[in-house]
Amino acid sequence: METYRRTAVIVGVLFIIGTVSGILSGVLTLPILDGADYLTKVAANESQLVLGSIFVLLMGFSLAMAPVMMFPIFRKFNEVLALGAVVFRGVLEAVCYIGTVICWLMLITLSQASVAAETLDAPSFQLSGALLLGAVDWFNLILAIVFCLGALMLYWMFWRTKLVPGWLALWGFIGAILYLVVPLLNMFDPQHPAPSLTSGVGLLMAPLALQEMVFALWLIVKGFNTPANIPEPAS
């Protein structure tokens, strides 16, 4: 039981670290990357963009560790779904975050080259910058889909194992379905915008975003329910 309690607290802390890191990254990077003069702002705020990139990596790695921590428990219930959660909410999600960071760091290199050439507004630099920002948007769309599929696996297993209250697991499962609608719709939008809570359809992301914070606090304060509901591996 002590092991289950420790795992619950670690998973809850990882969720909070990931969320807080994501918020801090947005605070640091959105003012720089927003607007037509983003190359000028990147050149003037390189350290701020690097720090924002570090927070994205911290977010990705902490969230990727959550399903890894749950794997020894969930594999007793369903090893395929447990491994799927590690792949989707662990490996693939982390890869998308890394892709985003690489694009941001390449923007720094691009802005340095444009400053050295004294042609910040040159079409070639603007095109390259637009391609990198576009790649970030696509990474975010793919990330949202991967995230939702992993969340569906996680909360389905929480529902079946009853490690957390049923209402909390069901909230996460339904929230993941609603969240999944946003990137799917945005992929067919002519502008292909990245998923955002500030857009109209982006409000569908709110239930899962709120649930994951409630879920994290629940794990830290209450821990898991009795693990007696988890079956032993079939012989």
Image (tube, rainbow, N blue to C red):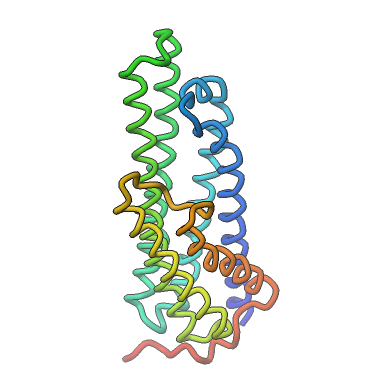
- In the image, what residue occupies the spot 49% across and 30% down? 35
Q: Give the camera-side residue of 125 and 222.
A: 125
- In the image, what residue occupies the spot 34% across and 58% down? 185
- In the image, what residue occupies the spot 45% across and 25% down? 108
Q: Residue furthest right?
A: 221
Q: Give the camera-side residue of 82 and 145.
A: 145
Judge left or right: residue 28 versus residue 63.
right
Q: Give the camera-side residue of 99 and 117.
A: 117
- In the image, what residue occupies the spot 54% across and 68% down? 207
Residue 103's place in the image compared with 196, above or below, is: above
Residue 189, horizontal then vertical, whole percent? 32, 51
Residue 88's place in the image compared with 156, above or below, is: above
Residue 194, horizontal then vertical, whole percent? 41, 48
Residue 235, horizontal then vertical, whole percent? 31, 91
Quadrant housing residue 107: top left
Residue 78's place in the image compared with 179, above or below, is: below
Residue 119, horizontal then vertical, whole percent? 40, 11
Task: Give the quadrant of the N terminus.
Answer: bottom right
Numbered marks: total: 0
